[in-house]
Amino acid sequence: MPDRTELPHASSGADDAVRPSPSRRPVEAVLFDFHGTLAQVEEPLAWVLAAASACGVELDRIRATSLADRLLTAGRAGGPLPARVPPRLAELWADRDLYPHAHRGAYTGLAETVDTGIDGFADALYERVLVPEGWLPYPDTAPVLGALRAGGVKVAVVSNIGFDLRPLFAAWGLDALVDAYALSYEVGRCKPDPGIFLRACGMLGVDPEHTLMVGDTPADAGAVAAGCGVLVLPAADAGRPNGLGAVLDLAGVG
């Protein structure tokens, strides 16, 4: 079940024990995490095959599967965390969500720890995270964003990321459904720092107490410290509904 934090309401003392009060305050805005909440990276085998093709190499399925397994262990942008970060990449890794060059350098550096025998492969793998084809929006993303827009609820994307997400949303035809983007490399703060959530609320012109943050990790739950309500969704594979319909219930949008 999703780990929900109810939007709290102010207490006025003992009278609350006998006077009914609303279960939560009205939601005027919803902040969404990106990866794992609105979209998922492409399947690993497709990722490796597409990158190899961009390098002019056609891999057979067996070799591509082996490379995908090794590259996932090394660390993939939008994928699992690396099993080990080499000391030479430690500084880039620490700054990956604050500077575009650090994001690219960290992930291409991790990919280069795998001997693939393909020239330019690390860069080609990284390029897949920058293009719409390298991601799959969850099937309930567009309907939920559309319903929020129709219901007058503002929307922002809040992401720890080292590159611009706006072109992806534009390519998917979802850009008109997002009012603002609070991206860590632009804001200079990373979740769970309350500052990034407060910046998103400021962009939308809404009070954090009337804002719901929706994500899939403990870092997203850091919005509680900024005064927001939080909905943490369970993990979902690409192509499967992500449970975003619960957002509409909490926001009072039918």
Image (spheres, grey):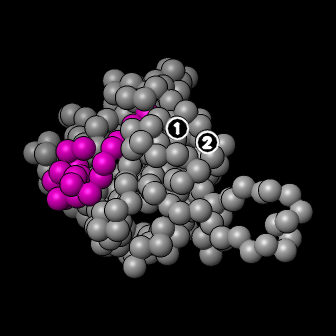
Which residue is at the front of the view, 3 or 48? 3
Q: Which residues are magenta?
A: 166-184
Which residue is at the front of the view, 62 or 48? 48
Residue 60 spot, x, y in % from top left: 21, 61
> Is residue 90 depicted above or below 39 in this figure?
above
Residue 11 shows up from this direction: yes
What amino acid is at disc 1? Leu
> Is residue 243 depicted above or below 162 in this figure?
below
- Count residues near mark 2 (Cα–Cα under 10 Å), then give few for <14, some for 14-19, many for 20+: many
Residue 211 spot, x, y in % from top left: 52, 53
Residue holding disc 1: 198
At x 40%, y 79%, the residue is 254
Q: Is residue 111 left or right of residue 252?
A: left
Q: Quadrant of residue 107?
A: top left
Indicate which disc, 2 or 1, sits on the residue closer to the N terminus.
1
Q: Are marks 2 and 1 in contact (CB under 8 Å)?
A: yes
Residue holding disc 2: 226
Q: Is residue 234 left or right of residue 68?
A: right
Looking at this rendering, what residue extends furthest in the right direction?
14
